[in-house]
Amino acid sequence: MSVRTRFAPSPTGYLHIGGARTALFNFLFARRHGGQYLLRIEDTDRARSTPEAVQQILDSLAWLGLSPDEPPVMQSQREPRHAEVARELLAKGAAYLAYDTPEELAAMRAEAEAQKRPFKYDGSKWIGMDPAKAPSVAPAIRIKAPREGETVVRDLVQGEVRVAASELDDMIILRSDGTPTYLHAVVVDDHDMAITHVIRGDDHLTNTFRQCMVYDAMGWRRPHFAHVPLIHGQDGAKLSKRHGAVGAIDFREQGYLPEAVCNYLLRLGWGHGDTEIISREDAIRIFDIADVGRAASRMDYAKLTHFNGVYLRAADDERLTREVLERFAKRGVLFGTDGAARVRMLMPDMKERAKTIEELAGAALFALQDGAPAMEPKAAALLTEEAKARLADLAQFLGDAPWERKDLEQWLRDYAEVKGVKLGAVAQPLRAALTGSTQSPPIDAVLFALGRSEAISRILAAAGE
């Protein structure tokens, strides 16, 4: 039996980071077993599903390297098949027509609430009814729940879970308007897509027992279920925007690398020894759903940022340069080939200090355009009259320097020695003049990337000449 998993988000908003982890687990499990990983867009909530949300999900998955092996299935396009199975269950006697009006159902719920008991639908009056005596209202189709015994699910994460028949009722599988319910449609789709393993959040665990009614009534083999605990904030509450970024697209915009996000999500609730930095190839080789814990995980943004820094330092310089320049282009920041070349030259040094691409972009801004950079207040404070005089003198000294990075640092040291001052007294105002900041890549790297003409021009501008 070939393993087939699926990720099945609803397109009612952004792809939540918890959903991204679910997609990752489905992807890794399928890859580990040489199977297929599929995507189903559960867009049956017509009022809330939007094409924009669908595209955002597809874009987010592509960014994470989790695009499906087959074209996505749109659940809304399969409604005729869902209705067909509902009618088949009706014909088999495993379901029945229920003629309750919305007002009658509301009254039943109100009565249960008044008696402080859970509402459990009892449709016995409709089972076996002569159609000629049926009310003149459009009926729903309800499946017959088991009346005795219990339903057992051997979950790959949660272990064996049992629910007594007394806790189940006859759920609607086809509404009176002919549309399928979510719990019914999911079963039909998973069966028709030949899904062997359903890996999803544990908030769906209670749904599983109701879905098993459809599997069992149709005589279909149930898939293996694995219900993964949810991701919470540091305070233990359900993860939301008040905790920080929660959408996959948010992390991309904040400058995280997709491989860092996936590595972090992999280690969030899944364990395999003490190793933390795990490549995609290694993850596929060692991933086992049995290693997923049963407790909810807590999102640690500081740890994610640490992971991102590790991946950033290992990333290809050309790729990072491209990412940084694309950010500037999207923001309307103009730059030419010289500016792009400077960013590329500085990248090996900048990525050693940065934790995100956004930080890289901030560090690279001074190199994009010719002319004196915007001056931060702390940098401007370094440009005292004494410092300005030294900068003017330094500009003449550097005019004869060999413009190679390996030589520039030594020239600065020689200058400081000749003038009888510490290197910091030279380098700090020089950094402010060149970058407009008190933080930058090594000063020799900055000088070399800017080039002799641009560097001296900035030094003189800061010196007031």
Image (cartoon, rainbow, N blue to C red):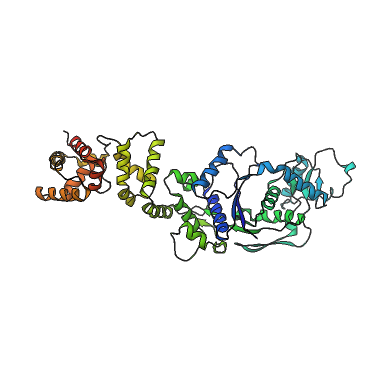
With 448 as the anchor, is 286 left or right in this view?
right
Residue 247 visible to an observer of this rendering = no
Q: Residue furthest bottom?
A: 273
Q: Nearer the viewer, residue 368 or 172?
A: 368
**How many discs mark residues in the rendered view?**
0
Q: Is residue 416 visible?
A: yes
Please, is residue 149 above or below residue 13 in the view? Answer: below
Counting from the top left corner in percent of width and height, residue 87 is at 79, 46
**For the point 57% across and 55% down, which residue is it?**
26
x, y percent for residue 397:
13, 42
Residue 394: give x, y in percent of width and height.
14, 42
Q: Identify whether 160 is placed above or below 390.
A: below
Q: Is residue 298 left or right of residue 314?
A: right
| Foreground of the two, 460 or 284 | 284
Quadrant assignment for the C terminus: top left
Q: Position of residue 374 (x, y in %)?
A: 28, 36
Kindly identify the residue that appears in the image at 32 percent across and 43 percent down. Answer: 343
Between residues 166 and 255, which one lies in front from this camera angle?
A: 255
Q: In the drawing, does residue 41 fall left or right of residue 172?
A: left
